[in-house]
Image (spheres, rainbow, N blue to C red):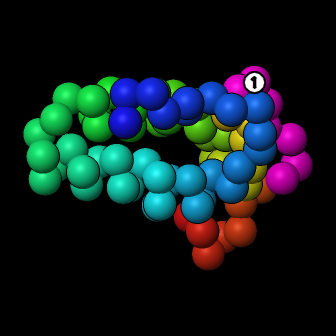
């Protein structure tokens, strides 16, 4: 787990990344209490954070490497 790259140069769905990857890392930490899972969850959370800085509704996608979130690509209301 310590070698996982949390900043590949790709654009991801904020919703899917939050519920699957971030949620999985936090669940793994809750069950194991291994700090590596918590550290990776924090690293990933910081990578998707730019999607939440534009409006009251987060952007739907964000590039994990650059933090770029295409303005105008608001999340579907069902995903909030």
Quarter of the image with the C terminus is bottom right
Q: Which residue is mark 1?
A: 66
Q: How many marks?
A: 1
Residue 68 located left or right of residue 46: right
Is residue 72 within the magenta segment?
A: yes
Q: Nearer the viewer, residue 31 or 42?
A: 31
Residue at 58% from the left image edge and 61% from the top image edge: 16
- Disc 1: CA contacts within 10 A as few (<14), some (14-19) or many (>=20): some
Residue 25 located left or right of residue 72: left
The image position of residue 56, as x and y in percent, is 64, 47
Residue 77 located left or right of residue 36: right
Is residue 43 within the magenta segment?
A: no
Residue at 29% from the left image edge and 37% from the top image edge: 37
| Among the 4 quarters of the image, the one containing residue 42 | top left
> Mainly helix, strand or loop, the magenta region?
loop
* Range of residues picked out in magenta: 65-73
Q: Nearer the viewer, residue 37 or 72?
A: 37
């Amino acid at each position: 787990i310590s070698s996982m790259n949390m900043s590949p140069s790709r654009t991801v769905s904020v919703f899917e990344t939050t519920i699957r990857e971030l949620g999985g890392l936090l669940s793994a930490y809750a069950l194991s209490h291994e700090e590596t899972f918590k550290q990776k969850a924090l690293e990933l959370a910081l990578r998707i954070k730019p999607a939440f800085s534009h409006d009251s509704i987060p952007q739907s996608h964000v590039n994990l490497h650059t933090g770029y979130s295409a303005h105008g690509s608001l999340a579907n209301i069902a995903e909030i």
